[in-house]
Image (cartoon, grey):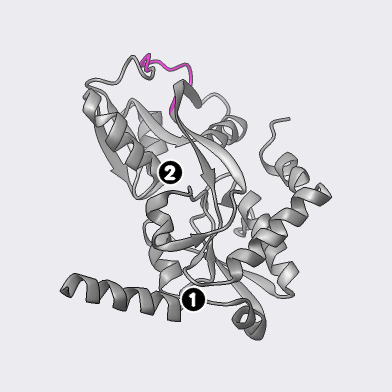
Amino acid sequence: MKRSLMLSVLVVSSVSLAASVADVKKKGVLVLGTDPTFAPFEFKGADGQIQGFDIDIARAVAKDLGVRLEVRAVGFGALMPQSVTSGRVDMAMSGITITPERAKVVAFSAPYYRSAQVFIVRSGNPGKFAWPADVKGKTIGVQANTTGQFTANDMLKPKGATLKVYDDFAAGLADVRAGRVAALIGDAPTVDDLKKRLPGQFDKAGADLAAEDYGMVFAKGSNLAAAANKTLARLRASGEYQALLNKWIVQK
């Protein structure tokens, strides 16, 4: 009974903090929370500004609402779900996978990108790492509070792998480069981006670990999710969505 009461209080609190379309229009700004370490979806450019595929999608949502977009850098551990449920941000995007567990706490838009969890290794794969054949006794890096970590707990630990958890994805990449971990779990487009930006340093190894869909994240009860879905449908119908894919993700 006590647990039920506490849960009810939490639900009421999260609903009361849910920003609405009217709230956003009144203040004239849509606040996006993102972890800018996930190129090409969100990262800091040479000018220090956060940019990427997710940022352009969010900017389109803000434009359709008639407001400006404000981007706030938030570490992934604090981004999901605390920054949204607390009202610190109006929405979150950072390659966030739609899962039934997360959907109990936050509201998701329709999927806007289909990705996969893959293994990132040093270029040339000197450790000869492969999945699913070569996991036992290996140390695999995962980023905290990501679906990569959750999937690794379910699929790799039972096969004898040791997981090393990083708050910062870049720290995991540094350990891959130095040979301190056999591989790091990341999203497929990240590997393509790394190979483009840092040629000769990283490769993908083995089969994909899992497929997943990304969604825009909002507080429970917010009608911003419906507004985002309208923007997403418009972008797809107009060809702008494909143009953004070509700009940020499709390898040339």
Q: Secondary structure at mark 1?
A: loop
Q: Quadrant of the C terminus?
A: top right
Q: Secondary structure at mark 2?
A: helix
Q: Quadrant of residue 193?
A: top right
Q: Residue extending furthest bottom?
A: 26
Observer able to see residue 247: yes
Q: Which mark is residue 170?
A: 2
Q: Amino acid at mark 2?
A: Ala
The x and y percentages for residue 188 are: 53, 33
Cα–Cα span, label 2 and label 1: 32 Å
Q: Residue extending furthest right?
A: 238
- The crowding category of the residue bearing disc 2, from other C-alpha atoms within 10 Å (few below 14, some 14 to 19, many at least 20), is few
Q: Nearer the viewer, residue 69 or 110?
A: 110
For the magenta stretch, what is the residue range?
120-129
Residue pictured at 54% horizontal, 47% vertical? 214
Q: Amino acid at mark 1?
A: Ala
Observer able to see residue 240: no
